[in-house]
Image (spheres, helix red, strand yellow):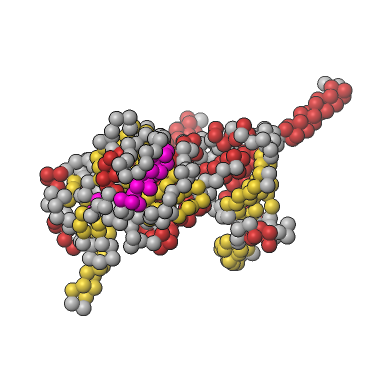
Amino acid sequence: MNKNQSRIIALVSLAIFVMAFLLSNRLFFRLDLTRDKAYTISEISRNLHREISDQVRITYFVSDRLSLAHPLPGEIADLLREYAAHSRGRIRFIQRDPMKAELLGEVEALGIVPQQIRVVERNESIVAQVFTGILIEYLDRQDVIPVVFSLDTLEYDLTSRIRALVRNTERDLGIIVGDGHVQWNSEYGLLHRELALAGFNLRFINPGEEIPPVLPALFVLGGAEDLDPAQLALIDRYVQGGGNVLFALDGVFVNTYGSLEAHPVDDQGLLAMLANYGVIVHRNLVLDMAALNLTFQTHVGNTTTIRTVRYPLWISVQEHAANTEHPLTARFRGLDMYWASPLELVPPPGIDAEVLFTTTDAAWLQTETFITNPTMAFHFEDEADMTRGRQVLGVSLSGVFPGAFAEQEAPVQGRPSRLIVVGNTAFAGQMMQNSRAEARNLDFLLRSAEWLSSDDDLISIRSRETSAGRLDRITNREERDAAMALSRSINTIVVPLAVVLAGLAVILKRRSKTVKEKGRADDI
């Protein structure tokens, strides 16, 4: 090879390198081997450019101190770069340190406030204040994700917000707290925070207030004993006009502020209205072998004892007990329910009804005497032999529903609606903290809000997210004991024995090799 050929090859290589560098912002490739492609944005997010007419700007405000101390900011930045890479120039990504850019006041005014974390610097552990939040801007509109400390729901949060900004639509969700003794802020604080973080504008509607017909979706939480026919007629009228509603309600009232005494609810019309739509809420309690633990105190004289028992009235709805064909429960993560009531579907003509999730086959009912006190657990199975079997706990219905109060109100032009009915109210409240079910229960409630708002494709983004699953998935005691015994055998016998055998094999191989080499030496 002469000098001219070498020079030409060097120039071509340099040109290829420069072109690859210039195209690096346009071309993006990532090898993602996870089951659900957890580190790759979905097709919905990749095709956002089709909806965007002007440029969307995503600014990731993150402290360099956090980026140096933790890998998460780098993973977040990679995800945001992927949005930009697939956007055909319609999405621009910027990363800034608020402190270095001298934007502390402006960033905090956006709602992105510093978080405290413990970092190690110069062999010293200190508490540092760092920023990690995202600002999304489109034309004169903007939205903010105040804190980003996880990739779990980041794609969902970004895509839903970008779409809302581009379409210039508000993601409104109405809330009616039907139980008169319950306050939204105290009982549903976790749900409020999660819905707000997901970008929903919550509109609180007092029972008896007119429901705006343009409201995309509505949550009705409880109310069987408190919502009267006049208040229910407004909800019925909303459904008739095409409104979409989640009903979470109980068939049996349990006094959680006293000694857990229970009685069938004195229905003022809500249960009858739902029966008219095609779902019967039975005034029974469901118990299941797939149960949660309950910790409580007992007092004998001056002695206080703390006990933890398996409490079958607190049900752990299993992942495999869901309808995987329905967008709401595809990749269902499970659900925890507290004193739930069974449902029965009896849809009128023209209504599509589907079961969303059920108990296990080992469930049973209390239909006559409601015993909920854990100290009387020996009575829990009094009706088990007569009522054993799988029970329906959540359903969905869609279609043009018949009016429940047609004779009292002026006729409404019927429009297709979507309904979700869950036979429990407490699963949406603070009770979920007792079983650490926040992630599972809130995930289902957020998916419900999306499905009711007809954003089915956003639900599919949430469905891609994976979880580690629960450690109590095996509910049959014999099967669980067998699995534990197998695990102990493998860890205490099989694995150590395999290590010993491998060591012996290595020793014998070396000894054989030594003997052969010694034999060759003797022959010589």
Q: Where is residue 36 in the image (x, y as percent from the top left)?
A: 47, 36
Residue bounds of the magenta highlight: 229-252
In the picture provided, is 370 more to the left or to the right than 492? left
In the picture provided, is 42 more to the left or to the right than 61? left
- Tell me which residue sits at (71%, 59%) in the image: 103
In the picture provided, is 448 more to the left or to the right than 89? left
Q: Is residue 518 magenta?
A: no
Q: Position of residue 215 (x, y in %)?
A: 47, 45
Q: Can residue 280 be seen in this view?
A: yes
In the picture provided, is 18 more to the left or to the right than 56? right
Quarter of the image for the N terminus: give it.
Answer: top right
Q: Is residue 251 magenta?
A: yes
Depth order, front residue of 499/385: 385
- Tell me which residue sits at (33%, 62%) in the image: 181
- Name the outermost residue toward the bottom: 302
Q: Where is residue 298 in the image (x, y as percent from the top left)?
A: 22, 69
- Tell me which residue sits at (45%, 55%) in the image: 204
- Tell me which residue sits at (29%, 48%) in the image: 270
